[in-house]
């Protein structure tokens, strides 16, 4: 008998958020242990062979304990620093302080581990060429991401909480074969748009406008062109088709008065309504309004709803006038 197939999506929907969180923590713990084992074995052979450090079992145990305690302290202390700094300076500055603390704390932890191991400055300088070559080749990508992360923190082309669009040659996009939206001020931007959630030492995490999250290496972000959408207000353009039975000289003033009361419009006197095209049955109007926020969708939706209500009332008025004229005739 053939068993019914169950999709991965159905399996994931049956798993509670707590179970998914615990499974991620277990996965992180296993990965961290494996990473420690691999790094420990490689460092043991490299350091023992070239006598950079006086390796012994006691030293290894002390370093391992110090590394675990240091990572735990950095994790919990970093969370407290991020919480306090976010309350004092806001989420953006708080996250930047947290990232700087984490970077400095890891460097200090590395120096402490070397001091516990009894590192000799002379031996370190003597073996520095070979060790630097090995580590540089092995960790070229990691180091470039860390250095790029420091550059991003210092230069601040974007911060946590910013909505940005970034363009980079590493991640290509298929450009659609149609022109930009008629009703938008935006040109066609073949990039990734979203909200910056975290700036780590190696990756920048974003939540895209479409919903999913993306982690981009800092070495890519430092080369990318970044467009910031952090605006307190922006121009929003909408379009609407109106039947020719309604006189534009009557429709435009009525629409202007109605849109001045819209909750998204911040400058009612700057509303501009123009006729962009006309056929034998309809004419197309464009509405430009300065609206609050850095997004277009919600203001445009509210504006179109108001326009629809006004147009429907004008159509009803025209039909009632026609009915009255016919009754008189």
Image (cartoon, rainbow, N blue to C red):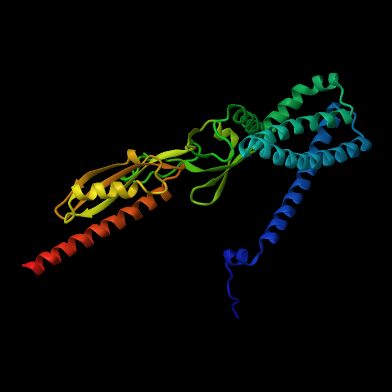
Q: Residue at x 59, y 30 (%)?
A: 152
Residue 135 or residue 274, whichever sits in front:
274
Is residue 201 in view from this perspective?
A: no
- What is the x, y in percent for residue 156? 58, 30
Horizontal side of 87 relative to 213 (left or right) equals right
Furthest residue to the bottom?
A: 1
Res 170 visible: yes
Along the line of sight, the residue nearer the viewer: 43 or 155 = 155
Please state the horizontal and vertical placement of residue 259, each as a whole percent of the image: 34, 48
Q: Residue at x 60, y 81 (%)?
A: 1
Q: Tell whether 155 sits left or right of 44.
A: left
Look at the picture and state if 327 lies above or below 310.
below
Against 213, is 229 above or below? Answer: above
Vertical placement of 310 versus 9: above or below?
above
In this rendering, the count of numbered labels is 0
Q: Image check: 58 left or right of 99? A: right
Residue 91 percent location from the top left of the image: 63, 39
Front residue of 95 and 121: 95
Q: Position of residue 274 (x, y in %)?
A: 24, 43
Q: Residue furthest front?
A: 328
| Residue 198 picture quarter | top right
Q: Nearer the viewer, residue 35 or 264?
A: 264
Q: In this picture, is 93 found above or below 212?
A: above
Q: Quadrant of residue 275?
A: top left
């Amino acid at each position: 008998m053939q068993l019914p197939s169950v999709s991965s999506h159905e399996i994931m929907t049956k798993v509670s958020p707590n179970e998914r969180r615990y499974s991620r923590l277990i996965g992180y713990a296993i990965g961290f242990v494996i990473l420690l084992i691999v790094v420990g074995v490689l460092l043991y052979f490299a350091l023992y062979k070239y006598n950079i450090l006086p390796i012994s079992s006691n030293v290894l145990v002390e370093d391992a304990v110090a590394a675990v305690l240091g990572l735990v302290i950095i994790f919990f202390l970093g969370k407290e620093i991020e919480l306090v700094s976010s309350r004092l300076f806001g989420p953006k500055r708080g996250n930047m302080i947290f990232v700087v603390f984490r970077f400095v704390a890891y460097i200090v932890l590395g120096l402490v581990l070397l001091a516990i191991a009894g590192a000799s400055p002379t031996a370190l300088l003597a073996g520095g060429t070979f060790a630097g070559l090995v580590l540089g080749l092995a960790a070229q990508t990691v180091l470039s991401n860390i250095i790029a992360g420091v550059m991003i923190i210092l230069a601040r082309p974007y911060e946590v909480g910013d909505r940005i669009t970034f363009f980079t040659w590493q991640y290509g996009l298929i450009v659609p074969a149609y022109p930009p939206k008629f009703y938008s001020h935006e040109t066609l931007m073949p990039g990734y748009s979203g909200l910056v959630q975290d700036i780590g030492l190696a990756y920048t995490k974003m939540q895209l406008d479409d919903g999913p999250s993306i982690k981009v290496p800092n070495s890519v972000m430092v080369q990318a062109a970044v467009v910031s959408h952090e605006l307190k207000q922006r121009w929003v353009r909408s379009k609407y088709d109106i039947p020719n039975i309604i006189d534009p000289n009557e429709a435009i003033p009525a629409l202007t008065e109605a849109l001045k009361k819209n909750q998204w419009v911040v400058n009612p006197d700057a509303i501009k309504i123009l006729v962009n095209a006309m056929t034998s049955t309809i004419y197309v109007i464009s509405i430009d309004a300065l609206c609050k926020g850095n997004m277009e969708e919600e203001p445009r939706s509210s504006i179109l709803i108001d326009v629809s209500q006004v147009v429907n009332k004008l159509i009803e008025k025209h039909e009632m006038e026609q009915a009255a004229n016919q009754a008189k005739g």
